[in-house]
């Protein structure tokens, strides 16, 4: 009798253990469907004192944050960045000039994954990229009684094959970097801003050269950044 009871208890315990393992596995599988990444290059450069040279270069991330949705054979990937610049530039006691710059960047694409071993992983794929830059400044220089500035806009589209490598600390945390080749189409528009600062009412206004052009080119993005990623 005691043997039968012990056997029943053991079967129940094993069933509960297996069910618990399955539930844990299911929870882990569900939790690992999404990934968030942030560019850590600025912090790494500061930590290793890489900006302490005589002529330091300011690092601005191409994308501040990334998102990946894990699928069976790879990831859907999305990244974005936003730069808004504006300040009051007082030229005289009565005139306030406001230079402004707005930059919007995003990409969306797909990457395939190839595991090297438990820690290292290669990924490769292609992105569609779109960059929009608006640059406005009322004061570039002045001469002959006129102040000259600009109102420029640049819209860029790109198709970008890429290749990257990832190191996994564990199932949730990893670091990565990547390189890409951009096939770019760029639309640039320039409009001058000309303002009279002389009191002479008969002063002839200089010519305004409004122009725009389109260009196609290629650009290599080297793996000079480190992204820290978290699986959720």
Image (spheres, helix red, strand yellow):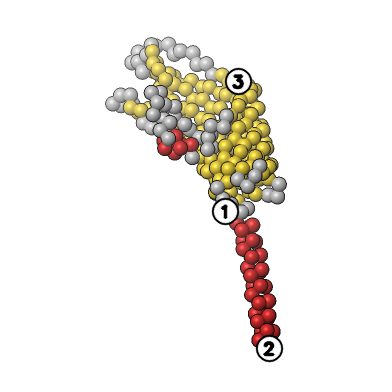
Kindly report which numbered mark, 2 or 1, lies closer to the viewer in this rendering: 2
When asked about the image quadrant of residue 12, the answer is: bottom right
In the image, farthest residue toward the right: 73
Residue at the spot of label 2: 1
- What residue is shown at x 58% (from left), y 21% (from top)? 212
Residue 135 spot, x, y in % from top left: 48, 28
Q: CA distance from mark 1 to mark 3?
A: 44 Å
Label 1: which secondary element: loop
Q: Is residue 102 above or below residue 171?
A: above
Residue 157 spot, x, y in % from top left: 63, 31
In the image, farthest residue toward the front: 3
- What residue is shown at x 62% (from left), y 61% (from top)? 27
Kindly report which numbered mark, 3 or 2, lies closer to the viewer in this rendering: 2
Q: Sequence-wise, which precedes: disc 1 or disc 3?
A: 3
When asked about the image quadrant of residue 117, the answer is: top right
Residue at the spot of label 3: 213
Q: Is residue 202 above or below residue 71?
A: above
Q: Residues within 10 Å of mark 3 (few under 14, many from 20)?
A: few
Residue at the spot of label 1: 232
Looking at the image, can residue 213 be seen? yes
- What residue is shown at x 71% (from left), y 47% (from top)? 73
Kindly report which numbered mark, 1 or 3, lies closer to the viewer in this rendering: 1
Residue 164 is tagged as none
Q: Sequence-wise, which precedes: disc 3 or disc 2?
A: 2
Label 3: which secondary element: strand
Residue 213 spot, x, y in % from top left: 60, 20
């Amino acid at each position: 009798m005691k043997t039968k009871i012990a056997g029943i208890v053991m079967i129940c315990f094993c069933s509960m253990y297996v069910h618990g393992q399955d539930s844990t596995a299911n929870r882990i599988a569900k939790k690992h469907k999404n990934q968030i990444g942030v560019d850590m290059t600025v912090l790494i450069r500061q930590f290793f004192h890489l900006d302490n040279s005589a002529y330091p270069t300011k690092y601005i991330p191409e994308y501040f944050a990334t998102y990946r949705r894990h699928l069976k054979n790879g990831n859907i990937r999305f990244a974005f960045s936003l730069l808004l610049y504006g300040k009051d530039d007082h030229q005289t006691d009565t005139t306030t000039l406001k230079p402004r710059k707005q930059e919007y960047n995003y990409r969306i694409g797909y990457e395939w994954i190839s595991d090297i071993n438990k820690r290292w992983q290669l990924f490769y794929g292609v992105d569609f990229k779109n960059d929009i830059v608006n640059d406005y400044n009322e004061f570039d220089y002045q001469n002959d009684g006129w102040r000259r500035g600009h109102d420029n806009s640049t819209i860029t589209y790109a198709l970008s094959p890429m290749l990257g490598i990832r190191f996994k600390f564990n199932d949730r945390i990893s670091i990565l970097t990547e390189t890409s080749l951009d096939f770019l189409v760029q639309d640039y528009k320039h409009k001058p801003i000309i303002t009279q600062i002389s009191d002479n009412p008969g002063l002839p206004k200089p010519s305004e050269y409004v122009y725009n052009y389109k260009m196609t080119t290629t650009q290599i993005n080297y793996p000079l950044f480190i992204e820290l990623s978290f699986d959720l």
